[in-house]
Image (cartoon, rainbow, N blue to C red):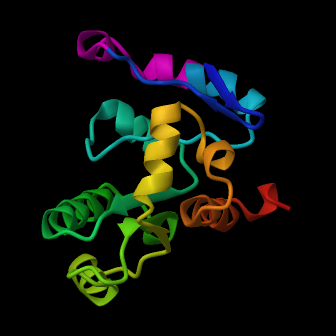
């Protein structure tokens, strides 16, 4: 676990894909049991791959956020993922669509996203390449690197949306 901010720790996934295949549901369950006592919120970044471990993490989740960008390939992938999650029995009320790198002037607008995915975006994370690149290049959280940026503020609003009781 890397302590990256006063209230943020990160546990990165396996850097070695061979070692990643050795992870079992029992390992994940043990990890979850350990972190649940230590943290108010646990976030998994599963990408768009649905495998047995991802399903196990999804089964344990209170909320599932599907992240898409304003491109046709991203909308196709997002639609496919939403369909798979629905077919697996995950409730639509549990799923939230997030639009990452949102640009009001993009060719694919919010109406096109809603039409293609059949769901209205729950939250928009604005395109803010300067702040995001600063944080990546300095190896620190946005909250420290670019406290007043639109992206930092939007991430705070997303946290308040997903965990209202945790932010009061």
Q: Nearer the viewer, residue 131 or 46?
A: 131
Question: Toward the viewer: 92 or 143?
Answer: 143
Residue 34 pos. (x, y %): 67, 21
Whether residue 71 appears in this view of the structure is yes
> Which percent across, then down, holds residue 103?
36, 75
The residue under the point 64% across, 64% down is 153
* Left or right of 127 on screen, residue 166: right
Residue 44 visible to an observer of this rendering: no
Left or right of 29 in this view: 77: left
Spot the residue most to the bottom: 111
**What span is in magenta?**
16-30
* Residue 81: quarter of image: bottom left
Residue 74, image quadrant: bottom left
Locate the C terminus by quadrant.
bottom right
Residue at (47% x, 50% y) in the render: 132
Main SS of the magenta part reads: helix
**20 falls in the magenta region:** yes
* Apparent side of residue 53 relative to residue 134 in the rendered image (left or right): left
Q: Residue furthest right?
A: 168
Of residues 113 and 79, the one nearer the viewer is: 113
Q: Residue at position x 31%, y 54% from top? A: 88
């Amino acid at each position: 676990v890397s302590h990256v901010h006063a209230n943020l720790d990160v546990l990165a996934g396996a850097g070695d894909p061979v070692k990643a295949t050795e992870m079992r549901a029992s390992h994940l369950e043990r990890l979850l049991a350990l972190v649940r006592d230590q943290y108010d919120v646990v976030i998994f970044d599963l990408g768009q791959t649905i495998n047995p471990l991802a399903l196990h993490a999804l089964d344990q989740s209170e909320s599932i956020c599907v992240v898409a960008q304003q491109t046709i390939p991203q909308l196709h992938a997002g639609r496919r993922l939403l369909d798979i999650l629905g077919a697996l029995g995950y409730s639509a009320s549990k799923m939230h669509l997030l639009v990452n790198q949102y640009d009001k002037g993009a060719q694919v607008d919010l109406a096109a996203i809603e039409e293609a995915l059949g769901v209205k975006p729950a939250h928009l994370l604005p395109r803010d390449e300067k702040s995001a690149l600063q944080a990546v290049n300095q190896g620190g959280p946005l909250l420290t690197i670019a406290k007043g940026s639109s992206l930092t503020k939007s991430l705070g609003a997303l946290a308040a949306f997903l965990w209202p009781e945790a932010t009061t």
